[in-house]
Image (cartoon, helix red, strand yellow):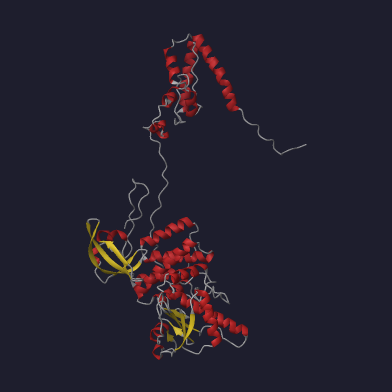
């Protein structure tokens, strides 16, 4: 039997084991047969009829709900998917009563999980699932009164259970209700000789949290989705080149690679010192956004590219001036509000 | 309309209290519709009466659409044993239909004092509301203060209430509103 639809299109739909007496073939639905429609109750098959709906000729199975005589029409090709099943047998009914009368001291206290599980149990359509809903909510009602939604769910589940028990045992619904009450709320001093209850109904597994995985092929901009906005930003190039044409490592660079980089940078600096050229300062500590802000506009960068290279002293001066200019900004960033003194006012 | 039929002698004061209480509980007119004999064929070997059989065999009264008939007997009743045995029987209702039966055999003794009579009347009214509630599609309630709570439940207080809980009251009102008449 198919479980609920998957949350993501790339996940396959879960297959749950079919409930006992599951009807997978529409040829089993002959007139006079009694079947159980999930969440609706016991229905009697009237026959198969053909109807012209929206220009299509459909074969429909006509059923009537026994409780109130409501007409139920099911397309013949949908029969295997809606969870129709045969009315429970005597053994199943006995197992359900032994389950109802057993001790139950573990009600689910998280209402979201409980409500979802109960809805799944009712949709699955098995009699034991319905009994589990009744038993679970009844046990919970002993701890605290049920909220309105769950009170309705309890009433619906009880209604389905009572009617199916009545049909399966061939007794009036009022008597079936007394049987259910006797199992759930036995009089003082009554003890049942119970058999081990049947295995619980399997519920569909809950969707797992999907964690976004960074794709290596895409750049940083791809992750941010800026490329989709259609803006002509030069962020990517700015990130690659840095403020003064220096190489800026990407934010996602491995920390493990840092020592090696440091070593290589140190070596490069030594070499340059030997040559008399100051090593360019890699602005690694700055996040990519900050680096992007500092990146010069396209025009100035182009102009800088056109300019002839300065002599070494001039470069050093230029570098020093830039360092001076940048200093206040760094100071501003470092400026921290003094922490309040401990112990409050002391005199 | 709720019609009360007695199969054994019931005091007039008790009947008056019962009709008043049923009217308050469901908002439907309630009247005494006479008495009928107990069908002897419904009696089992142990002297008790099969509730289901008795309700089927008892002489009918004239009713109209959506009328509910409540039979009251003092005979002990029995039910067909189920998968876990025979449940105690304080009454039987044809769920969602028009006939119900209650017995006074399990009620406290009526006595002669005012308090004992009041206790008896309240318990009788509670059983009547429970039986008529089933006729209006109400299921048994888990709330021990509700009249739809089973009478044999160990959680039932010594002097139980004879009112419906909010959920049962609203459901019965909805059902009564949707009735044919």
In the shown orientation, is residue A117 left or right of residue B119?
Answer: left
Residue A164, x across and y down, in percent: 36, 70
Residue B13, x across and y down, in percent: 56, 86
In the rendered image, which quarter contains the N terminus of chain A? Answer: bottom left
- Residue at the front extreme, as displayed: B181
- Residue at screen point 34% across, 57% down: A16
In the rendered image, which quarter contains the C terminus of chain A? Answer: top right
In the shown orientation, is residue B3 left or right of residue A169?
Answer: right
The answer to whether residue B116 is above or below residue A233 is below
Decide if residue A93 is in sight here: no
Residue A288, x across and y down, in percent: 47, 28
The quarter holding residue A176 reads bottom left
The answer to whether residue B33 is above or below residue A239 is below
- Residue at the right extreme, as displayed: A347
- Residue at screen point 52% across, 12% down: A316
- Residue at screen point 48% across, 8% down: A311
The answer to whether residue A279 is above or below residue B8 is above
Residue B33, x across and y down, in percent: 46, 85
């Amino acid at each position: 039997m198919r479980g609920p639809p998957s949350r993501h299109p790339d996940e396959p739909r879960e297959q749950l084991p079919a409930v006992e007496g599951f009807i997978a073939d529409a040829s089993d639905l002959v007139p006079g047969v009694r079947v159980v429609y999930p969440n609706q109750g016991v229905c009697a098959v009237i026959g198969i009829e053909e109807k012209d709906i929206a220009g299509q000729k459909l074969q429909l199975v006509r059923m009537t709900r026994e409780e109130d005589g409501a007409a139920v029409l099911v397309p013949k090709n949908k029969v295997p998917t809606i969870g129709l099943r045969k009315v429970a047998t005597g053994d199943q009914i006995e197992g359900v009563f032994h389950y109802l009368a057993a001790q139950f001291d573990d009600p689910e206290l998280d209402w979201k999980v409980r409500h979802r599980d109960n809805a799944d149990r009712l949709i699955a359509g098995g009699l034991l699932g319905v009994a589990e809903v009744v038993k679970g909510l009844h046990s919970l009602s002993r701890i605290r009164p049920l909220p309105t939604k769950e009170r309705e769910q309890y009433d619906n589940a009880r209604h389905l259970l009572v009617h199916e028990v009545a049909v399966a045992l061939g007794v009036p619904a009022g008597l079936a209700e007394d049987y259910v009450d006797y199992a759930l709320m036995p009089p003082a001093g009554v003890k049942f000789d119970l058999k081990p209850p049947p295995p619980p109904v399997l519920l569909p597994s809950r969707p797992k949290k999907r964690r976004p995985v960074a794709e290596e092929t895409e750049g940083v901009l791809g992750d941010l989705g800026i490329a989709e906005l259609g803006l002509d930003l030069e962020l990517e190039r700015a990130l690659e080149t840095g403020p003064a044409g220096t190489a800026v490592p990407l934010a996602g660079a491995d920390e493990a690679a840092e020592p090696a980089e440091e070593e290589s940078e140190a070596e490069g600096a030594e070499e340059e010192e030997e040559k008399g050229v100051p090593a360019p300062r890699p602005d690694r500590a700055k996040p990519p956004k900050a680096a992007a802000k500092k990146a010069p506009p396209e025009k100035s960068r182009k102009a800088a590219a056109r300019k002839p290279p300065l002599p070494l002293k001039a470069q050093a001066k230029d570098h020093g001036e830039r360092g001076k200019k940048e200093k206040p900004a760094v100071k501003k960033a470092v400026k921290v509000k003094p922490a309040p003194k401990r112990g409050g006012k002391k005199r | 309309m709720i019609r009360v039929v007695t199969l054994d002698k019931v005091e007039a004061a008790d009947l008056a209290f019962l009709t008043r209480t049923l009217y308050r509980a469901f908002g439907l007119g309630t009247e005494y519709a006479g008495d009928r004999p107990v069908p002897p064929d419904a009696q089992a070997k142990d002297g008790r009466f099969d509730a289901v059989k008795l309700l089927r065999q008892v002489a009918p009264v004239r009713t109209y659409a959506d009328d509910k008939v409540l039979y009251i007997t003092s005979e002990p009743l029995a039910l067909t044993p189920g998968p876990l045995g025979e449940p105690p029987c304080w009454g039987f209702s044809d769920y969602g239909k028009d006939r119900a039966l209650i017995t006074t055999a399990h009620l406290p003794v009526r006595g002669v004092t005012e308090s004992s009579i009041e206790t008896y009347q309240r318990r009788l009214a509670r059983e009547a509301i429970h039986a008529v509630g089933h006729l209006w599609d109400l299921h048994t309630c888990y709330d021990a203060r509700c009249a739809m709570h089973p009478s044999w439940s160990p959680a039932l207080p010594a002097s139980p209430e004879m009112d419906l809980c909010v959920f049962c009251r609203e459901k019965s009102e909805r059902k009564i509103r949707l009735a044919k008449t």
